[in-house]
Amino acid sequence: MVMLNRKFSAPKMTDVDQWRKVEYLVSQGFRFQSIREQPSGLLVQYPATLADAKLFVKRHAAQVR
């Protein structure tokens, strides 16, 4: 069992692409916690697609808790 942040909103069960994105992010250590842009400190939105998620992970890997 993986505990995700309360901010996580599950996609529809039938939305396989979104579940693949969620699976990828969780496997990389992202639990839907707040991520901030460095050095501005602005909140970053989680990615909409798996392709975007791969870039997101590269850019924000240092913030994984």
Image (cartoon, grey):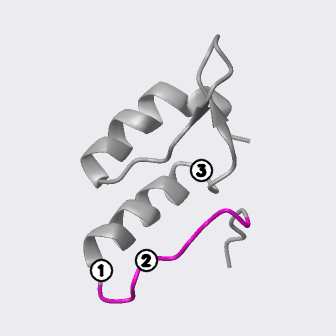
> Would you say the residues marked 2 and 1 are in contact, meaning their CB atoms lie under 8 Å apart?
yes
Secondary structure category for the residue under label 3: loop
* Residue linked to disc 2: 11
Where residue 3 appears, x then y in whole percent? 72, 70
- Where residue 4 sits, quadrant-wise, is bottom right
Q: Residue at x 42, y 36 (%)?
A: 56
Secondary structure category for the residue under label 1: loop
Q: Compared to 44, does 1 lie above or below?
A: below
Could you give the CA–CA distance between mark 3 and mark 1, rounded to whole angstroms? 20 Å
Q: Is residue 34 left or right of residue 37?
A: right
* Residue linked to disc 1: 15
Question: Would residue 20 be counted in the magenta stretch?
Answer: no
Identify the magenta region: 6-14
Other-residue count near label 1 (Cα within 10 Å), few / some / many at <14 / 14–19 / ≥20: few
Q: Amino acid at mark 2?
A: Pro
* Residue linked to disc 3: 30
Please state, as top left, top right, bottom left or bottom right, where the C terminus lies in the image.
top right
Q: Amino acid at mark 3?
A: Phe
Q: Is residue 26 left or right of residue 58?
A: right
- Residue at the limit of the structure toward the top, as seen here: 39
